[in-house]
Image (cartoon, helix red, strand yellow):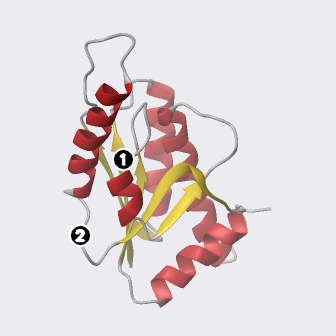
Amino acid sequence: MLKINIICIGKIKEKYFAEAIAEYSKRLKAFCKLSVIELAEEKIRDNNPNGAQIDEVLRAEGRRILSKIQNSDYVAAMCIEGKQLSSVQLSEKLDSIALSGKSTVDFVIGGSYGLSGEVKGRADFKLSMSKMTFPHTMARMILCEQIYRAFEISSNGKYHK
């Protein structure tokens, strides 16, 4: 059974997002072992940080993210410059990863400033949800739903129409 980690910066504060993620996590138990790994968001004291401060935040968050990734994991970095996939294409991608012998897929969602170059460099694939920008908590919920949909597609389930 494929293990899927969603490695993300920050905690879910909105109850409705937490409930939706919990529901998809429950549904996914039939298909994979899902773990959501929440890492602390780096604090910036300045309300208007400069580039160097943002780079330091990205490096610090990136180190925490990379510490959760094993060498054998397949890593999908969620970033704006990534490739956009349809739900069917995501399903095919997960099937392909599983068939390649990988047992763990890490989806990585950065903090407010995105992902460090080191994390993107470690990624096997860069995935973009949309050209639109979503709050990180919403992106996490949408990702959970899309992972569930991908497994339903692979199993010819009725969820995807």
Residue 65: x and y in percent read 27, 51
Residue at coordinates 38% horizontally, 52% vertically from top-left? 117
Location of residue 90 in the rendering, given as x and y in whole percent from the top left corner: 63, 67
Going from N to C along the chain, the mark reached first, 1 or 2, is 2
Number of marks present in the image shown: 2
Give whichever of 115, 117 is nearer the camera. Answer: 117
Please tell me how crowded label 2 is: few (under 14), some (14-19), or many (20+) other residues with Cα within 10 Å: few
Q: Residue furthest right?
A: 161
**Residue at x 30% of width, y 11% of height:** 46
Q: Taking 27 as reference, is 67 left or right?
A: left
For label 1, the residue is 116
The quadrant in which the N terminus is found is: bottom left
Q: Is residue 41 above or below residue 43?
A: below
The mark closer to the camera, 1 or 2, is 1
The answer to whether the residues at label 1 and label 2 have Cβ atoms under 8 Å apart is: no
**Residue type pointed to by label 1:** Ser
Q: Which residue is mark 2?
A: 70
Q: Can see residue 152?
A: no
Is residue 57 rendered to the left or right of residue 19? left
Quadrant housing residue 146: bottom right
Q: Is residue 25 above or below residue 54?
A: below
Q: Quadrant of residue 75?
A: bottom left
Q: Can residue 59 be seen at all in this image of the molecule?
A: yes
Q: Which mark is residue 33?
A: none
